Amino acid sequence: MTYKTHFIGGICAAALTSTIMPVESVVLTTVVSAVSALVPDLDIEDSKLGRKAGLVSKGISRAFGHRGFFHTPILYIVIYILMNMFLPTFLSMGFLVGTMSHLILDSFNYKGIMWLYPLTKRHYHIASIKTRGFGETMFLIAMVALSVYAFVKVGIATEPMNFDVETVKNALSVIVEDVKTLSFNVVEEVKVNLMK
């Protein structure tokens, strides 16, 4: 899955868990979740977060490889427990929700992840969705729709909130551009599939 899918997956996971959070912390938890959804791919040097992390990503990649230890639930559960002892709940909950969303999404790829590590190093997968393929694009669209539905249901999208307007405008413009790009990619892929 691409970083955009993982990022939206983090938002979607936060939206789905928003019913168990206080309304005032949902937005912060969602932001943390979206960013945390990129963390497992620190084990890829050329991933979105890997490029920003530089030597840290390079070290993780060399030590564990892609979809090794950095793609195991046990790592993020332990980090969540430690974070929860010292940090506000929205940070620890957002981190856990985001990283777990990444692992769940990677389970929809044929490579899977090591769900039962350290008991076994076997990779488990649910489906065989190809990265950057039509299936991933459809998955992404479904997650956006599910996120909107969940946020409306919990009242986040309908309640007035205290936001910095400029930050929200910038975030929305990035989302709009990503949706335009994804829509174009879907149309192109449908054309290619129809020509086969």
Image (spheres, rainbow, N blue to C red):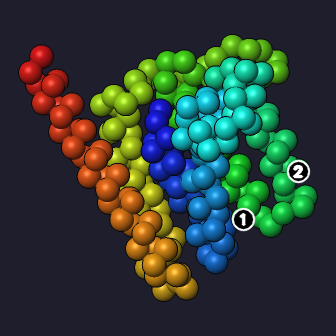
The residue positioned 64% from the left and 49% from the top of the image is 36
Between 119 and 52, the residue placed more toward the observer is: 52
**Quick one: quadrant of the C terminus?**
top left
| Picture layout, residue 21 above or below residue 40 | below
Name the residue that disc number 2 marks.
Answer: 82
10 Å crowding of disc 1: few (<14), some (14-19), many (20+): many
The residue under label 1 is which amino acid type? Phe
Q: Is residue 165 left or right of residue 102?
A: left
Name the residue that disc number 1 marks.
Answer: 90
Give the numbered dot on residue 44.
none
The residue positioned 47% from the left and 32% from the top of the image is 1
Residue farthest toward the left in the current orientation of the protein: 195
Q: Secondary structure at mark 2?
A: helix
Residue farthest toward the front in the current orientation of the protein: 55
- As measured in the structure, the alpha-carbon distance from the residue carrying label 1 to the one carrying label 2 is 14 Å
Q: Position of residue 193 (x, y in %)?
A: 16, 24
Q: Secondary structure at mark 1?
A: helix
The residue under label 2 is which amino acid type? Leu
Image marks 1 and 2: residues in contact by CB distance under 8 Å: no
In this rendering, the count of numbered labels is 2
| Picture layout, residue 33 above or below residue 191 | below
Q: Position of residue 128 (x, y in %)?
A: 44, 20
The residue positioned 60% from the left and 52% from the top of the image is 35
Q: Position of residue 34 (x, y in %)?
A: 57, 53
10 Å crowding of disc 2: few (<14), some (14-19), many (20+): few
